[in-house]
């Protein structure tokens, strides 16, 4: 057995965890002449021949279902012959039981989990008296059985069996442990780690996995392929324990050691890259994760072949990351290929092909294809079987199947599925609070004559469950199943015209995205402050207690059980969790700035609007697309006639053409008609200033580009009717002062035309060598400085800030140009007190440069190691900037964090954390002369007494109609500038 493949409920990835087949390298004790069972004895010659044939089949047969059937037949022949061969005491030959252990691993590979468990248990029980003679076979099989029982939801039983075997094995090989025995010991330690992790014994899991690593490192050395496997297994355990900084460090160690010492054809080479990708994905860095998983997949294709089970796992892992990044169209072919491969090798009815079908069904629904989603999900449900108790798999299938059936007007069938699913959830001992709440909502919303109040209560229950989950682990973001549930809540809110419910659902999506955008800085805060780390660990324990109490209460309510004592426990758990959360927020204010925002109220948002203002929130979340329209006097919850896929396609078409100087007029009009139906326009009849909140691809598109709004054929730009500004969060900023009318002189600080230093590349290469010790990875700088050095110079930006400095009568001004535009300069205390901060430089999108997993600005490198010339979002967040305005005159400065996160969630969020107020940013690269005109005119308008939104609005109008600048009337020139309000 080369690999055990685990399904991680926290990461939703298939993780290939190597269990070295030590019995293939270790001569069995029973083959020695001193053993009474030795097959070299003449009376056992027939068994020797059969074992040789079975081993030959194991080595040379194709590793597909047909090949494994022939291998199983070979081991069965040995088993049957051994069972007829009696020893002097009348017992059967031990190979009877050893052959069962071999068969069990093959049954597992076929996806016959129950049969594999039964066969392994029989083999272990029968072999136990002979453990001194067959220690490695016993150990390997116990390790496999432990993982299988854990996967099946029986970790306590698994632990008792594996721990007993571990102790007996240690005694059996204590005197002269062979290489195979050492690897078998490591396998057992790994198995115990996986079991204790499932039991919630996190520290025990880490201790066992570290022991497994130490066992291999002592016996095989630090750079052996099997030691590398132990490194990335340890990284996986650290990841699941929530210790992401350490997990990344160890995963990078595995990659470095594999790159330096392991042949690329060895499985550990590709899997080290794969594990680093998985860790990065769970650290909120899906773009980097995609790169590593893609590299791992290509290595598997090259060295292990495309028609292999391990390649199928690799495709599945990559597709899962892309699904989490909401790249729905990209994953369909990947999941289809993975399903085909895993069906051939494991059987169509095994867990992983079913999951591939389920995920493909989710993607199909998100792409507006409910009929295709129904086909895939019904196929997956059929393969599971009517009597299945696998709630985890059902949770990936039934919710979207119910939704697809309702969209196809098959309401009765949808209700039947929903009711049966809820029953399975309530019968399960492993379900979580979200699954219970979502199952209830699916059933009550599918009822033909549902109680409106009951549906609203169930919808709020789902949001509460998601909110608690997101608050504990903000780096991972919302899962696809959460988005599916939120989409259903939004649909319910629109049908009920329930603005409060719509706001709660929308703010959960945007708040999660913002918290995830800040997660990089949050992780660094945690890593640098042991007291904060301890407090967060304690809060995590209280969150787990609250989750358990909530789950038990929900089950009791659904089963009509007594709840008095349960309510006391729930109240106490909630009180302790809230107290812990409050203490952390008070003691660690920097951490508080990175937190998931609480849900605001309709009245609070309305109170923040002036008489001629409105808030227009757009949410294309999963299947549908929705809007919340707020004015000081009214509120509406709306579902657009255009679904998410159609809306996103229009936005992408419009955005992709304008960025290259072209313009899709048809897409602009169609988008305007989709976003501004009559019910929206009625709400905006008295509105002059429109504050826009958008998620997904719409957040990366300035709505000033929209035409045709309100009526077909209208060629009026939206910006000609409304003064537009943007907000990233659906919450009024309590600490933001009322906007002042400014006429006094202001202070200016500006950075432009940074220098890059290509000579630093040699130092980067030196730093990239394999480290001497693992601690080196905690401070490793992996930025691709050669790529930074290759960025084109920006001499025009120097003239841009000189123009701004000369055109406005500033109180005082400081210009940092060329080598002076450095990170050390922006950290100076006096810089943070400027009224206007201008940064005219390259803006980097997350993942654009190797090693930069978040948005960043390029500055000049300095002499200090920390001054690498890349000012990342997490570094900006730790600055002290009190600027009234930050003007980011750089390409893509409105970009988000990538990986499904919207624009404004990256640099803008970082500057707000640093203390800045509002931002003027651009959606794409702009000409220096146009950037200088807009920035200068906006500041002049602001000093003349206009609000910031009006100042930018009139500056853009003047650019279009009065500037005389060539090309200024094109939307490519004037549309990218947007104001993001804090």
Image (cartoon, rainbow, N blue to C red):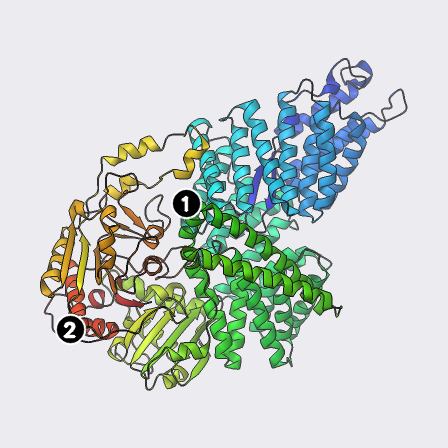
Q: Is residue 219 above or below residue 120?
A: above
x and y percentages locating residue 254 in the rendered image: 47, 34
x and y percentages locating residue 423 in the rendered image: 71, 65
Left or right of residue 946, residue 425 in this image: right
Q: Residue at point 52% right, 40% down?
A: 235
Q: Is residue 131 above or below residue 886?
A: above
Report whether residue 152 is seen. yes
Quarter of the rendering occupied by the N terminus: top right
Real-space CA distance between mark 2 and mark 1, rounded to the nearest whole angstrom:
44 Å
Number of labels in the image equals 2
x and y percentages locating residue 649 in the rendered image: 38, 66
Left or right of residue 32, residue 701 in this image: left
Please state which of residues 412 and 152 is positioned toward the viewer in this rendering.
Answer: 152
Of marks 2 and 1, which one's residue comes earlier in the chain? 1
x and y percentages locating residue 142 in the rendered image: 71, 35
Q: Is residue 422 above or below residue 323?
A: below
Please state which of residues 639 and 878 is positioned toward the viewer in this rendering.
Answer: 878
Q: Which mark is residue 958?
A: 2
* Quarter assignment of residue 788: top left
Q: Is residue 807 above or below residue 274?
A: below
Q: Residue at point 44% right, 44% down?
A: 294
Left or right of residue 689, residue 444 in this image: right
Q: Residue at point 62% right, 67% down?
A: 437
Answer few, some or many: residues within 10 Å of disc 2's Cα (few below 14, many 20 plus, some between 14 and 19): some
Q: Please name the residue that numbered disc 1 is placed on.
A: 291
* Quarter assignment of residue 15: top right
Q: Secondary structure at mark 2?
A: helix
Quarter of the rendering occupied by the C terminus: bottom left
Q: Nearer the viewer, mark 2 or mark 1?
A: 2
Q: Which mark is residue 317?
A: none
Please state which of residues 143 and 375 is positioned toward the viewer in this rendering.
Answer: 143
* Quarter assignment of residue 684: bottom left
């Amino acid at each position: 057995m080369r690999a055990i493949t685990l399904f991680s409920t926290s990461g939703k990835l298939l993780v290939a965890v190597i269990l070295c087949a030590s019995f293939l390298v270790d001569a069995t004790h029973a083959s020695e002449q001193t053993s009474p069972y030795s097959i070299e004895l003449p009376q056992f010659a027939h068994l020797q021949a059969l074992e040789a044939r079975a081993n030959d089949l194991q080595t040379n047969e194709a590793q597909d279902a047909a090949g494994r059937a022939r291998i199983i037949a070979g081991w069965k022949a040995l088993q049957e012959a051994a069972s007829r061969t009696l020893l002097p005491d009348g017992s059967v030959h031990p190979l009877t039981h050893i052959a069962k252990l071999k068969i069990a691993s093959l049954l597992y590979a076929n996806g016959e989990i129950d049969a594999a468990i039964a066969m392994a248990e029989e083999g272990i029980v029968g072999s136990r008296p002979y453990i001194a003679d067959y220690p490695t076979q016993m150990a390997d099989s116990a390790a496999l059985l432990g993982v299988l029982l854990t996967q099946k939801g029986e970790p306590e039983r698994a632990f008792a069996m594996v721990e007993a075997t571990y102790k007996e094995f240690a005694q059996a090989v204590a005197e002269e442990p062979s290489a195979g025995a050492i690897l078998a010991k490591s396998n057992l330690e790994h198995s115990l780690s996986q079991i204790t992790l499932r039991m919630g014994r996190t520290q025990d899991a880490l201790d066992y996995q570290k022991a497994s690593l130490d066992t291999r490192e002592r016996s095989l050395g630090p750079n052996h392929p099997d030691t590398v496997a132990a490194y990335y297994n340890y990284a996986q355990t650290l990841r699941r324990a929530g210790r992401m900084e350490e997990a990344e460090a160890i995963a990078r160690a595995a990659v470095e050691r594999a790159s330096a010492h392991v042949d690329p054809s060895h499985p550990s080479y590709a899997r080290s890259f794969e594990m680093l990708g998985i860790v990065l994905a769970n650290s909120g860095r899906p773009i980097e994760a995609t790169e590593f998983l893609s590299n791992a997949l290509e290595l598997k294709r090259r060295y292990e072949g495309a028609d292999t089970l391990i390649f199928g796992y690799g495709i599945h892992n990559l597709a899962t990351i892309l699904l989490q990044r909401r790249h729905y169209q990209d994953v369909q072919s990947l999941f289809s290929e993975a399903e085909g491969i895993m069906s051939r090798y494991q059987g169509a009815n095994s867990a992983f092909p079913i999951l591939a079908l389920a995920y493909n069904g989710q993607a199909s629904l998100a792409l507006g294809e409910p009929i295709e989603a129904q086909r895939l999900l019904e196929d997956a449900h059929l393969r599971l079987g009517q009597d299945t108790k696998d709630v985890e798999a059902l949770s990936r299938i039934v919710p979207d199947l119910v939704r697809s059936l309702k969209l196809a007007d098959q309401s009765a069938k949808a209700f039947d599925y929903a009711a049966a699913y809820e029953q399975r959830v309530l019968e399960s001992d492993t379900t979580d609070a979200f699954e219970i709440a979502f199952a209830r909502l699916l059933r009550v919303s599918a009822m033909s004559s549902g109680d409106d109040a009951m549906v609203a209560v169930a919808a709020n229950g789902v949001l509460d469950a998601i909110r608690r989950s997101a608050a504990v682990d903000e780096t991972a973001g919302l899962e696809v199943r959460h988005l599916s549930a939120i989409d259903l809540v939004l649909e319910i809110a629109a049908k009920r015209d329930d603005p409060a419910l719509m706001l709660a659902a929308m703010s959960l999506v945007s708040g999660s995205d913002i918290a995830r955008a800040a997660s990089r800085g949050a992780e660094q805060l945690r890593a640098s402050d042991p007291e904060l780390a301890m407090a967060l660990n304690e809060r995590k324990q209280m969150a787990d207690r609250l989750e358990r109490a909530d789950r038990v209460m929900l089950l009791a309510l659904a089963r009509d059980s007594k709840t008095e004592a349960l309510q006391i426990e729930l109240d106490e758990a909630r009180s302790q969790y809230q107290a812990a959360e409050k203490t952390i927020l008070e003691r660690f204010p920097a951490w508080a700035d990175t937190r998931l925002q609480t849900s605001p109220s309709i009245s609070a948002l309305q109170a923040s609007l002036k008489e001629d203002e409105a808030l227009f929130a757009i949410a294309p979340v999963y299947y549908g697309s929705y809007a919340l329209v707020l004015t000081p006097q009214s509120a509406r919850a709306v579902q657009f006639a255009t679904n998410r896929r159609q809306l996103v396609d229009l936005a992408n078409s419009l955005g992709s053409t304008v960025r290259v100087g072209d313009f899709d007029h048809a897409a602009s009009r169609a988008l305007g008609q989709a976003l501004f139906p009559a019910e929206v326009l009625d709400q905006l009849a008295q509105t002059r200033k429109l504050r826009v909140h958008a998620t997904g691809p719409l957040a990366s598109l300035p709505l000033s580009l929209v035409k045709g709004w309100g009526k077909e054929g209208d060629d009026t730009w939206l910006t000609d009717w409304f003064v537009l500004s943007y907000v990233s969060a659906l919450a009024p900023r309590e600490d933001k002062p009322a906007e002042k009318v400014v006429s006094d002189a202001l202070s200016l600080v500006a950075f432009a035309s940074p220098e890059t230093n290509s000579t630093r590349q040699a130092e980067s290469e030196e730093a990239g060598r394999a480290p001497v010790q693992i601690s080196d990875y905690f401070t490793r700088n992996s930025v691709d400085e050669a790529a930074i050095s290759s960025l084109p110079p920006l001499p025009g930006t120097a003239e841009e800030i000189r123009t701004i400095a000369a055109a406005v009568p500033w109180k005082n001004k400081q210009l940092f140009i060329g080598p002076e535009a450095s990170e050390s300069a922006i950290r100076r205390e006096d810089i943070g007190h400027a009224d206007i901060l201008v940064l005219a430089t390259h803006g980097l999108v997350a993942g654009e440069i190797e090693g930069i997993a978040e948005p960043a600005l390029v500055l000049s490198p300095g002499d200090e190691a920390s001054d690498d010339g890349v000012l990342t979002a997490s570094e900006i967040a730790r600055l002290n900037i009190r600027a009234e305005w930050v003007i980011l005159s750089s390409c893509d400065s409105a970009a988000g964090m990538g990986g499904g996160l919207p624009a404004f969630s990256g640099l803008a969020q970082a500057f707000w954390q640093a203390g800045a107020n509002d931002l003027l940013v651009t959606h794409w690269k702009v000409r220096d002369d146009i950037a200088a005109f807009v920035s200068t005119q906006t500041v002049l308008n602001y000093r003349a007494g206009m609000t910031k939104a009006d100042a930018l609005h009139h500056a853009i109008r003047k650019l279009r109609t009065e500037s005389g600048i060539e090309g200024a009337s094109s939307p490519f020139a004037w549309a990218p500038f947007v104001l993001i309000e804090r």
